[in-house]
Image (cartoon, rainbow, N blue to C red):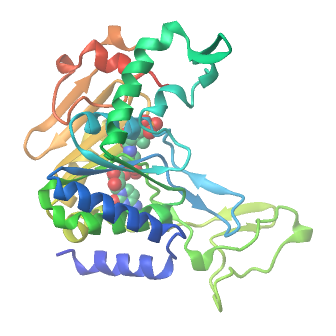
Amino acid sequence: MADSSAQRAESHYFTHEPPPKDLKTNTTLARAFITRHADEGRRVVLVTSGGTTVPLEQQTVRYIDNFSAGTRGATSAEYFLQNGYAVIFLHRQFSLLPYSRHYSHNTRSFLDYMKEENGQVVVDQQHQDQMLRVLRQYTEVKRENRLLILSYVTITEYLWNLREVAQLMRPLGPKAMFYLAAAVSDFFVPQDRMVEHKIQSNEEFLQGAGASGGGNTKPPAARTEGKRLVIDLEPVPKFLKQLVDGWAPEAIIVSFKLETDPSLLVKKAEYSLKKYSHHLVIGNLLATRKWEVVFVSALDGEKWIRVPTNRRTKSFSGMPSLVGSADQLTKKDIEADDSI
Ligand code: PMT
């Protein structure tokens, strides 16, 4: 059971932060997807991907964002699919998607892969092999209906979706996996401290000091004071605790740890593993995330996976499997990941 303070924090959060409009639709889709694959005896993984936003206004013009293009999540989802999993891909709207990631968010337009031949649009010869390989994988996954794509934008949308899907996956026991690659906000503006309209910078147009929450006396979390913008965020409850202890206690749980200071990475990954007692923390540094990650687990301790220096010309952001070493990476694995 989760400790009572974590439960209280969860209950407070979900009572005060309204669910996203599309939650019911997402839940219906996820339920059908999970049931079908459970009946077929398949493992189901929820891959989260992309950054969560923290809106400063209800009618949002400004927001704080967490860094993530979605490369790790989208790439990893492809590997899970190749290994027979059914994948629920919960991603930040418009971040990278499995398969299409090879042709989007690129300096090259997707039209650069095409040419005109006898009045028809065809794929240019030089891209045929690679595109055929991706297309075949994608078509097979679609035929077997093994990929469900859901999206979020804000931290609250993310957390509501995560909680609902986790609870739906709970009956799968250890056949459920959570692979939490999304970059999740640690701080946010609670609904009852959020102004409705765009925060004004011109003192002549300043709004009343109160946030829009009915009868609320607290000052808005984001407001102007004189000419300054003051932002006073509150902590997002650590949902990982609730996931491990309450929402899906038998599932395999893999979390990520992003740091910028190399001296902190392993320490913080170990701290997270100890605190939440889940299965694996994958640590990465912002600057080197494309070619090295560290796996920290109770079973294997600290294990680094590195793409050899002479193969770093193309970006690497996914893992061929959850355990392994750089030696196990084939050239194909690295070249397959050519999105960014
Ligand atoms: O998408 P790319 O551009 O390829 O980048 C990939 C990545 C760097 C974003 C990815 O590899 C990564 O590291 N993702 C996790 C980033 C992150 O949220 O790290 P964190 O240190 O803030 O959080 C660590 C863990 O705590 C998270 O897995 C999250 O599950 C958990 N957490 C976070 C916030 C919160 N309020 N509660 C939590 O439980």
User: Residue 134: image x %, image y %?
Assistant: 39, 25
Q: Can residue 313 be seen in this snapshot?
A: no
Q: Residue at x 52, y 76 (%)?
A: 18
Residue 176, given in percent of the width and then of the height, sits at 20, 55
Question: Does residue 45 lie above or below 213 as drawn?
Answer: above
- Quadrant in which the N terminus appears: bottom left
Tell me which corner region of the image, top left, top right, bottom left or bottom right, holds residue 201: bottom right
The residue at 43%/76% (across/down) is 13
Question: For the image shown, how many numbered marks are present on the structure?
Answer: 0
What residue occupies the far bottom of the structure in this picture? 215
Question: In the depicted view, which residue is nearer to us: 137 or 228?
Answer: 137
Q: Residue at x 65, y 92 (%)?
A: 215
Left or right of 267 on screen, residue 101 = right
Residue at the image point whose x is 37% and y is 29% from the top: 317
Residue 258 placement: quadrant:
top left
Quarter of the view holding residue 163: bottom left
- How far across and down, in percent of the image, does residue 326 sit? 21, 20
Is 159 in front, or is 268? 159
Left or right placement of residue 269 versus residue 201 in this view: left
